[in-house]
Amino acid sequence: MHEPVVSLADVSFRFPDDQVNTLNGLTFTIRRGERVVISGPSGCGKSTLLYLLNRLYPLNCDGIVEGDIRLFGKRADDYRPGEINRLIATVFQDPDSQFCMTTVEEELAFTLENLRVSRADMERRIVDVLAQTGLTDFRNLVIQSLSGGQKQRVATACALVAEPEVLLLDEPLAHLDPLTARNFVRWLDGIQKQTGLTVIAVEHRLDLWEGFFEREIVLGSDGQMIGDHTADSKAPVVFPKRASGMTGKPALSVSDLSVEISGKQLLELLSFDIGEGEIAVIAGPNGSGKSTLAKALCGIYKHTGTVKSPGTGYVPQSPEFLFLTNSVQDELSFSGLATTKMLDDLADRLKLKAIWDAHPFAVSHGQKRRVAIGAMLADNRPVIIMDEPTSGQDVAGLQELFSLIDERSREGITFLIITHDMEFASAVADSVILIKDGRLTGKFMAEEVWENPALLNAHHLLPPKGADRREPAFA
Amino acid sequence: MLKSWKLKEIVLMSLFGVVFGIVYLVAIHFGNIWAGLIGPIAYEWMFGIWFIVSILSMAIIRKPGAAVLPETIAAIIEVMLGNAVGPRLILSGVIQGLGAEAAFAATRYRHFNLAVMMLAGAGAAVFSFVYGYFVSGYAALDPSFVLLMFTLRLLSGAIIAGIGGKYLADGLLATGALRGYAISRTKQGGAGA
Amino acid sequence: MSRLLHDMNPSVKFIIVTVSMLTMAFFFNPWTPLLFWIGILILQMTMSRINWKLWALMMLPFTLGAVGYLWTTLVFGADTGGEVIGSFAGIEVTDQQWAHAWSLTFRVLAFSTLSLLFAFTTNPVTFVMSLMQQLKVPPKIAYGTMVGYQFLPVLKDELTQIRQAQRLRGVGQDRHWWHRITGTRRLLIPMLAGAVRKAERAAFAMEARGFTGERRMEFYRPIKVSGRDYVLAGVFLVVLALSCAGGIVLGK
């Protein structure tokens, strides 16, 4: 057995403004070279636990720690600020907010300067880590010009350049599409095998990791440990079977739609029809024009061709971008188009009564989405486009999203949903619209698409699990 | 002084500086170049916009320096973005920030109500005007005209920065985003200790 | 030769620019700022490679501002005595006022040219790194500023998304400036709320990589002050001194 790198004995944690503990009586030991995942529902304190290991907490939040945390055999409190970060490095979830310098090279040097590496050593370590991570060609690139997946690799390189013993991962796949996520995991697998790093991750969607982890520590919603066992490959999120809500009447009709913005042809001659109550998934590679299509359909972008619709609404990935007022109620009544009775009915159906007077920014993400849909329906927009609603969602979030969409479709609301998540798509979609390079590949019945791996592959999509069981799981 | 500052607070002030910079450029867009023809008085009434970031940051963070630092950082970022007013923005940023800071220091960082914030806006206006008087040579102008400019700037500081800053701080507090910052620890977000 | 100003140490350049501006503030004769303005233009033309078209475009608002200064000082000039040299629409202008007006006008032009010289020849990242290395700006401030700079494209895109979403809700472009000011609240609140979240994430990512805000001993890319910087600073100071002296002589 290898020596312990992290050990916790009866550790509890409380934020200064809270009455109850976020973490309760945690006891476990992690040894060198282990691959451990910490799982649990949203808000169970997974990330808080991670921040206790890299010493971001308790200092950053003035939190109260009880019990004994030992890192490499030494009490956590005995480390000077920044000292532990030589040994324990972290990659976070948001690819956009992990960098402070312009180029990859400068960002790597930032870590090395923090750790007071001598200038003579810096060059060697930068060259080494770039070679190790396969990023040598990225050295002089501007970080903000990279894609999300590339940024996460750069963030990992910036952690590894410290030559740490432990790598902490805080939901590193949350903002990546499934294909990019899978490639990231395989890439990380190679690096771990090469270095023998200890990897401790916080993650709620284990299915994306295939067989990466050896051990799973499960936290309950009250911050207690409810499991510590061998990790098994997780089945994907399970959704109930749904019956289509299509009424047979037409809803949205698009013909010869083209969009050109500042001289660039973003969409070219798209034509398709969507029926009332239909749920259509829009999918395609990044940059293929999905969001452009969404914005053209609801009238944000100018377009040529015709779009016939009873009223098209749009819910951006961050629903709060739509909000204009200080309460949920005002949000729904903002346009003044809905009568009091209609509002009351919407509040009931969308379960908004409990937060009726709350500030729309202060409610949960799932509730924000409900408020946004409520606002669209109150504005008489029965065709709703949702832009990447699956991004960053945990199991509970995805299931809630499913029932939200499913229930509305049975009320005759039509949905167009942009997503890369074919697991979710296969559960919810009646039809799939595939787009590539600004052109419509076609509108397909959902089942047709799942049975056609080549078609999915051409659009940078992973088939839903269960559709293709021969997909080899790697380990 | 910086010891007691958390990095997240400093980064917060920096991002606030960028947000105000962008919103100003994109959404308000008074950058109407022809206004220059009207002469130095054309911009007086909107000087307060530049002081908001000081007052908002102080309202949230409530530490000595929370007015002067954001104004300084915002000025450095403006220069990085290639603002044509150039390096002298940094000096004027520090001076304006000190003006706002003076008002909070005078109340010993205990009160963050509307009156103190308007005073801070006025303080920033006074400091920036004194500096402007020297650098832009207002001495060559008729005293009554200078007085008119000063009054406009003072009102702008107190109203746009003071009232506007308080209004934004309250609005932001209501969104629940400020959990963990000093403003959330006092019961009624404003009325002091 | 022609890229000297681009390679000049940014902190030295910054100090020289600031000193020059503060010095100009003591002169109310038209010659000093005029001479200095010409001097700066010559330095810019001989020691830098810039896009003069863009330069002219950026100079335009300042030129209009200078005109604004000119007539403001003529119409609302301080009563300084001296001989009346002309009148227009009932406003009498003395020789003193005439001199002051041109002095302030050239001052605006000289300041603007100096500012553009700095903006066109200075790399923003190098500037902040130099502030930290030469002028001892604390690393927390320097890197905090860098983060803000990196977030610019992200926040700009976010603003676009918010405006588009709000337009869909029926919030249009406000026509009047007072509406635009009050309307910015709707844009500012989501932007600021997002900034609070992003600031914490970015700060955590930096600290998790060992950033403590302590002063650094060694830099990957040290920014140095070389003999050339002192020579260039000397050149600027000579131009400044000659303008001051020239102004005093010619102003008599």
Image: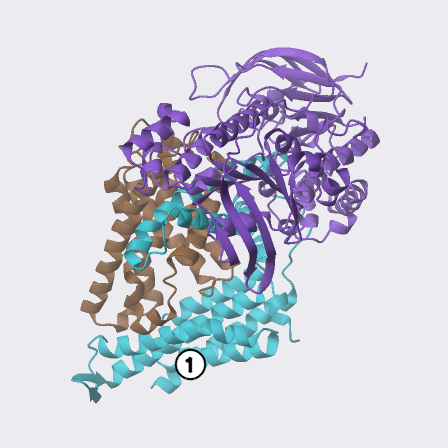
Please give the name of the residue rendered at 44% of the width and 35% of the height, measured from the top-left corner. A373
Front position in the image: B169 or A119: B169
Which quarter of the picture shows residue A341? top left
Q: What residue sits right under mark 1 in the picture?
A: C34
Front position in the image: C26 or C165: C165
Please give the name of the residue rendered at 51% of the width and 52% of the height, measured from the top-left corner. A296
The numbered mark 1 sits on a residue in which chain? C
Q: Position of residue A285 (x, y in %)?
A: 67, 46
Q: Could you say whether the residue bearing mark 1 is in a helix, strand or loop? A: helix
Q: Residue furthest bottom?
A: C85
Q: Is residue A96 left or right of residue A375?
A: right
User: Amino acid type of disc 1?
Assistant: Leu
Q: Residue furthest front?
A: A248
Q: Colour of chain C?
A: cyan
Q: Colour of chain A?
A: purple
Front position in the image: C47 or C241: C47
Q: Is residue B137 left or right of residue A268?
A: left
Please give the name of the residue rendered at 36% of the width and 34% of the height, measured from the top-left corner. B173
Q: Position of residue C98 (x, y in %)?
A: 28, 83
Q: Colour of chain B?
A: brown
| Quadrant placement of the N terminus of chain C | bottom right
Q: Position of residue A423 (x, y in %)?
A: 65, 30
Which quarter of the picture shows residue A10? top right
